Image (cartoon, coloured by chain):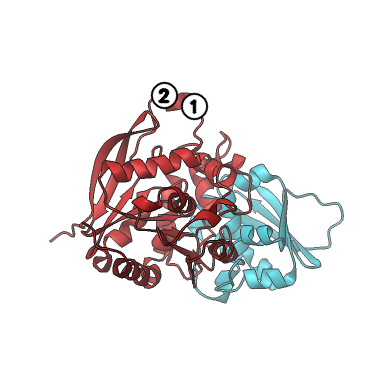
Amino acid sequence: MPEIEPIVGRYIHFPVDGTSYRIYFEEAGQGIPLVCLHTAGSDGRQYRHLMNDSSVTGCYRVIAFDLPWHGKSNPPIGFQDREYRLSTRVYANTVMSFCRALELNQPVVMGCSMGGRIVLELALVHADELRAVIGLESADYQEPWYDTAWLHRPDIHGGEVCAAISSGNMGPHSPNEYRWETLWGYMQSGPGVFKGDLYFYRVDSDFRERVTGIDTSRCAVYIMTGEYDFSCTPEDALRTGKKIPGAKVIIMQGLGHFPMSENPELFRKYILPVLDEIAENTNPPT
Amino acid sequence: MALIEKLPELVNNDEAFVRRGRFLTAAIKIVVGDEEYWVGIKEGRVVTVECGPFLMRSCDIVFRASAEAWAKFWERYPPPGYQDIFGLTKSGEAEVSGDWLLFMQNLQYFKDLLQAPRRLAAEVWNA
């Protein structure tokens, strides 16, 4: 018999700030909604291992959607005449609009890298709609370490340079198979999309002051960062966690900037206890 | 350093490596502490490795770090922050200078080239 995975993909239409979007999402499992946000310049396939893990899908409905401009979610009509630049407002509104469109009850939102940044904003502004947030490779701010202008210009192959920029930010023990699958996502990104995501990450999301307002009694906060992440470093994660009373910070040994996709076996050893704790400490969905 | 002098066999015997660099012809300098190496690349093959000092010899890109930093970088499993040239440049332990357009056009090739000596430590992890 051929192997058929339990993951199911569908499209949903909803507006964000007056613009209509056709959004692709995948899901597997039943129980507490767990909405997963991909990294900049990639798409929801990064979470395929989590969606195939029966230890997770037994009590979580794991859902990963592609942001507009990413993966199988189209850019808006007229995209060819504008430069893509993600903002904090649009990103937060897109995530919450998705949750509301699917009528998710008190979801957990987990995001990686820029997804790990936006969950801090969600915990601050939308605490009462969320059960918890998990920031992977997450911090309130990070020092830039390259010029994003190199990511989108006609004399450099965008897909190859986006992948190559990211290629070394993984743990050296991560299996080659998953390392290159992670990079394949970057190679497939649309022109200028990674750069446009990094506008949010670099320019529009300095949360060093804002995170102090997060109330973890209303929305639990977990920050999980790989020791090999030199982009969003363990020091960045620890600094951020110190500003949020009640936040739990976990440094993941052996992992880099893409824990869920670069080394899924190792990642599950860190994420399963966190998901168990969230399930035990929060009320069951009604 | 013997490790760099092994670059021709590490690269040229790897068909996929050479294929990825088939449009690249360049000269680079790798500076390891007080020692410098001039590496000539032609259509993806490493055709020359010379140990300096060099007087007034130009090159396209220079990669410079201390011998200690390169030693960690070339470990089979480097410590955190030493697994990628950008980790070293971010921390200030390495410097890249020269033709940035050429570097970014062939970024994965240059990363693989710099990391190739790790294969002498043990099996490939980033070929």
| Label 1 Cα crowd, 10 Å radius (few <14 / some 14-19 / many 20+) | few
Colour of chain B, in one word, is cyan
* Residue A179 position in % (x across, y down): 44, 60
Q: Residue at (66%, 62%) from the top-left corner?
A: B88
Point out the image quarter for the N terminus of chain A. bottom left
Kind of element beneath mark 1: loop
Is residue A66 rendered to the left or right of residue A284?
right
Q: Residue furthest left?
A: A1
> Which labelled disc corresponds to residue B81?
none
Quarter placement of the C terminus of chain A: bottom left
Q: Is residue A210 visible?
A: yes
x, y percentage for residue A61?
Answer: 25, 57
Residue A92, image x, y percentages: 43, 43
The chain to which mark 1 is attached is A
Q: Is residue A3 left or right of residue B42?
A: left
Of the residues shown, which amino acid type is indicated by label 2? Gly
- The shade of chain A is red
Q: Are marks 1 and 2 in contact (CB under 8 Å)?
A: yes
Residue, disc 2: A78
Q: Which subunit holds the residue at mark 2?
A: A
Residue at point 65%, 42% (across, down): B101
Q: Which residue is mark 1?
A: A82
1 and 2 marks on the same chain? yes
| Quarter location, residue A19 | top left
Question: Residue B18, can we see it?
Answer: no
Looking at numbered disc 1 in the image, what kind of residue is underneath it?
Arg
Alpha-carbon span between mark 1 and mark 2? 7 Å
Nearer-the-camera pick, A77 or B78? A77
Residue A56 vertical placement versus A37 (above, below): below
Horizontal side of residue B59 vs A137, given as left or right: right
